[in-house]
Amino acid sequence: MKRNKILYWISALALCTIILSTVYVKAQNMTTATPDSNEKDIASIINTDGRLSTLSSALDTAELVTTLRGDGPFTIFAPTNEAFEKLSTQTLKDLMMPENKTKLVDVLFYHVFPGRVSSDQATKLDGQQITMQNGKQVDIYLRDGELYINEAKVIIKDIPA
């Protein structure tokens, strides 16, 4: 598939985001939170949230569930089902085919920040860029008091995992 089509998928999926972030931090200069036995990992939250069922299927197809259950920290700017619905049925079907796993992983890693960033921290990054897990950068900015990642409005913030 052409690079432009992949960039289209990335842009289309970035319509609505939910910030899910790990709280069990092992990185230097960060505090390790005390685990709460009631907390779920990121993959479990995605799997049980009906708004994220397409993302859950994509993570299964890309074989990334175990990765998201591993040591973090990670922050997921999770595209909702509504974001996936902006793609054509054929585009989504193609993306989920086993032979396109590498492209799917790239698209999914475009939504993963390799660290923990809360919505308050992201707000302080207004006008800046951060580098996502796939090496590509996204813009963080505020518009009318709302947080955006590229053109995606963050609709739900700070779901700890």
Image (cartoon, grey):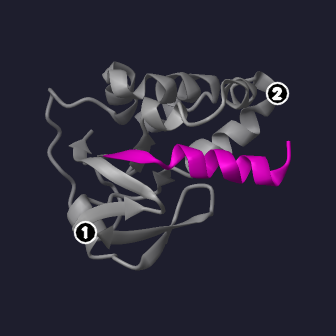
Q: Give the percent coordinates (x, y) of residue 65.
A: 50, 28
Instruction: Identify the image quadrant of the C terminus.
Output: top left
Amino acid type, mark 2: Glu
Residue furthest toward the bottom? 127
Q: Give the percent coordinates (x, y) of residue 80.
A: 42, 35
Residue furthest toward the right? 1
Q: Distance between the residues labelled 1 and 2?
A: 42 Å
Q: In this view, does 36 lie above or below 4?
A: above
Residue at x-position 33% and y-position 58%:
116
Amino acid type, mark 1: Asp
Q: Nearer the viewer, residue 79 or 12?
A: 12
Q: Give the percent coordinates (x, y) of residue 87.
A: 61, 35
User: Can residue 30 be seen in the rendering of this structure?
Assistant: no
Q: Give the percent coordinates (x, y) of residue 106.
A: 66, 47
Residue 92 occupies quadrant: top right
Q: In this view, does 80 lie above or below 135?
A: above
Please name the residue that numbered disc 1 is placed on: 144
Residue at x-position 61% and y-position 27%:
63
Say which element carries label 2.
helix
Q: Nearer the viewer, residue 139 or 47?
A: 139
Q: Nearer the viewer, mark 1 or mark 2?
A: 1
- Residue 61 bears which disc, if any? none
- Residue 99 bears which disc, if any? 2
Callout 2: 10 Å neighbours few (<14), some, many (20+)?
A: few
Question: What residue range appears in magenta?
Answer: 1-19
Say which element carries label 1.
loop
Give yes or no for residue 68 being in the magenta stretch.
Answer: no
